[in-house]
Image (cartoon, helix red, strand yellow):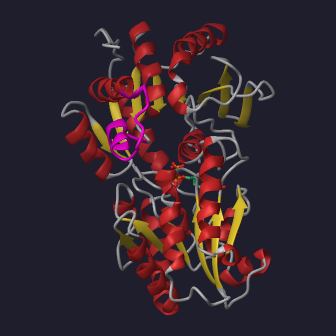
Amino acid sequence: MTFQPRTPVALISIHGDPDIAIGQEEAGGQNVYVRQVGEALATLGWPVDMFTRRSHPEQPLIVNHSPNCRTIRLIAGPEEFIPRDQGFPYLLEFVDKFQAFQTETGIEYELIHTNYWLSGWVGLELKKRYPLRQVHTYHSIGIVKYQSVPDIPQIAQTRLNIDQLCLETAERIVATSPQEQQFLRELVSPLGKIDIIPCGTNIEKLGKISKTDAREKLGFNSEDKIVFYIGRFDSRKGIETLVRAMAESKFRHSPNLKLIIGGGSRSGCSDGLECDRIRKIVHELGLNDMTLFTGRILDEDLPLYYRAADVCVVPSHYEPFGLVAIESMASYTPVVASDVGGLKFTVIPEVTGLLCPPKNHLAFTEAIDRILSHPEWAKKLGEAGRKQVEAQFSWSGVALKLSELYTQLLSEPAQRLTIKQKF
Ligand code: UDP
């Protein structure tokens, strides 16, 4: 590949540190997205700096991932984990530190790509200070999220305002699925420019090991019927639905039925509480013997778990994109997912997996049992999934699309934000 010198870009992801261990303390899809997009853009010749907030005094301030790509941690607020709903008060300090970094290093970012509303606000504020181009990816839309949570946080109105202002003023919004674009249009604003560029997955790393080898390495045998979940412990991820579905499975009393639940962190944090709640339900339903809680699954072990599974279940109440579904498909493993958000875009029912109404555990039981009962059909679903991911969802393909977008925006004049914000 030939490297063209290009202008440096800043990926801003305040609460989604691209260098942090995934699977704990709210770290999930956004962290993976920023890191993978950053690295893939760097291989296309873009100097990429990924800015995040330092959340521990021992974290290095700068981590070089490759000659063109690094994580830069700015100190804004206490150097400790702060839940995302409590991050707003530290944003102004983050903006000041970002500007100071530019002054100290002489680097001027003409294009910033902000991730999630907290970084979106930082982008708006920077754009008030000097002209630039802002690309924004939501990762989660406030108004959609608040429809699915029982407790609306105090910061909700601020977030809704910022979601709208980003859509109306950023040079481009990157929606990761047509469903996300539709929500933005219908629920946030008819104004603003949206491109659909999906998330991706590592097709070189996933799906390379055989199912037999993967099972052998993990200590499972060929008779096992393995149902796999991986992700953050958050009630909106619907792990409860999966557990209740397993309790109704026709294989329930077979010693071969196994439920693997991957992800999670130390207790005491919010995801630890959800983990404790799920463990309690597993216990109450008498599923202890079939269930394995692995905790956080390391990057190098992920391909083994995905490949060893007969079916991967994504029972989320809502999912803007859902990386897990395409990671599973890249590993030749069929997906049973909720019929929501980005999952409607990535999972093709009866072709690469099955979709079920969210929270409907009996529908999940039926879908999971169908796949477990028909291994030949499951194999076909898995192969079709792999093909689809290769065609549509590789990180290198995603980075090419973003690269084209950045190039186009950089050929247009940079804008300053002049309007007054209403918060
Ligand atoms: N993940 C991981 N190890 C874990 C738990 C999760 O690597 O122990 C990764 C998973 O492989 C996926 C991401 O975290 O890449 C979760 O992304 P998704 O879009 O499914 O959910 P989000 O976290 O954005 O809600």
Q: Is residue 160 above or below residue 178?
A: above
Which one is in front, 145 or 180?
145
**Residue 333 visible in the snapshot:** no
Judged from this view, the residue extending furthest toward the front is 284
Image coordinates of residue 374 in percent, x first then y, are: 48, 91
Asked whether residue 124 is drawn in magenta, I would say: no
Magenta range: 140-156
The answer to which quarter of the image holds residue 40 is top right
Residue at 32% x, 47% y: name it: 180
Residue at 46% x, 30% y: name it: 113
Image coordinates of residue 346 in percent, x first then y, are: 39, 63
**Residue 161 visible in the snapshot:** yes
Q: Is residue 228 left or right of residue 178?
A: right
Q: Is residue 382 above or below residue 413?
A: below
Residue at 67% x, 63% y: name it: 302
Image coordinates of residue 86 in percent, x first then y, are: 54, 26
Which one is in front, 306 or 210?
306
Residue at 28% x, 10% y: name it: 419
Q: How many marks?
A: 0
The answer to which quarter of the image holds residue 154 is top left
Asked whether residue 150 is drawn in magenta, I would say: yes
- Report the quarter where the C terminus lies: top left
Image coordinates of residue 16 in percent, x first then y, are: 58, 36
Which one is in front, 15 or 276?
276
Q: Is residue 261 left or right of residue 84?
A: right
